[in-house]
Image (cartoon, rainbow, N blue to C red):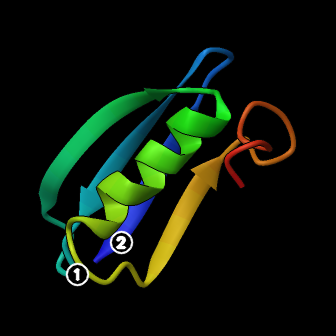
Amino acid sequence: MLGGVDSHADTIHVAVISDNGGHLADAEFTTTAAGYAAALAFLEAHGHVRAIGVEGTSSYGAGFT
């Protein structure tokens, strides 16, 4: 399973993708420590995550990364 994160100023949108590229789930979280923890828990709740792609790791995505 793979994860993807689209980062914004106030929220991050997290998607869970199957190994063959199918959409499994997605959700939005706040850009706070609690929101980041909830996003990771959301990903982990769907099984073993092999990799997470994060858009904007040097700006809005830095906190999550």
What x and y, as percent, mark residue 61? 71, 40
What x and y, as percent, mark residue 59? 84, 34
* Residue drawn at 51 percent across, 67 percent down: 52
Q: Callout 2: helix, strand or loop?
A: strand
Instruction: From the viewer's side, name the closer residue of 31 and 1.
Output: 31
Q: Callout 1: helix, strand or loop?
A: loop
Residue 52 relative to residue 61: left or right: left
Q: Amino acid at mark 2?
A: Leu
| Residue 28 quadrant | top left
What x and y, as percent, mark residue 6? 52, 37
Q: Amino acid at mark 1?
A: Asp
Give the vertical position of 58 relative to 22 (above or below).
Answer: above
* Residue drawn at 25 percent across, 63 percent down: 17
Instruction: From the viewer's side, name the closer residue of 39 and 61.
Output: 39
Outermost residue toward the top in this view: 10
What x and y, as percent, mark residue 22? 13, 64
Image mark for residue 19: 1
Query: Label 2: how many residues lie within 10 Å, few (<14), some (14-19) or many (20+)?
Result: many
| Residue 60 quadrant | top right
Residue 6 relative to residue 45: left or right: right
Q: Quadrant of the N terminus?
A: bottom left
* Residue drawn at 44 percent across, 29 percent down: 29
According to the image, label 2 marks what residue? 2
Image mark for residue 11: none
Q: Who comes first in sequence, dot 1 or dot 2?
A: 2
Q: Quadrant of the C terminus?
A: bottom right
Give the vertical position of 35 relative to 11 (above or below).
Answer: below
Q: Are marks 1 and 2 in contact (CB under 8 Å)?
A: yes
* Residue drawn at 34 percent across, 60 percent down: 43
Marks 1 and 2 sit apart, C-alpha to C-alpha, by 7 Å
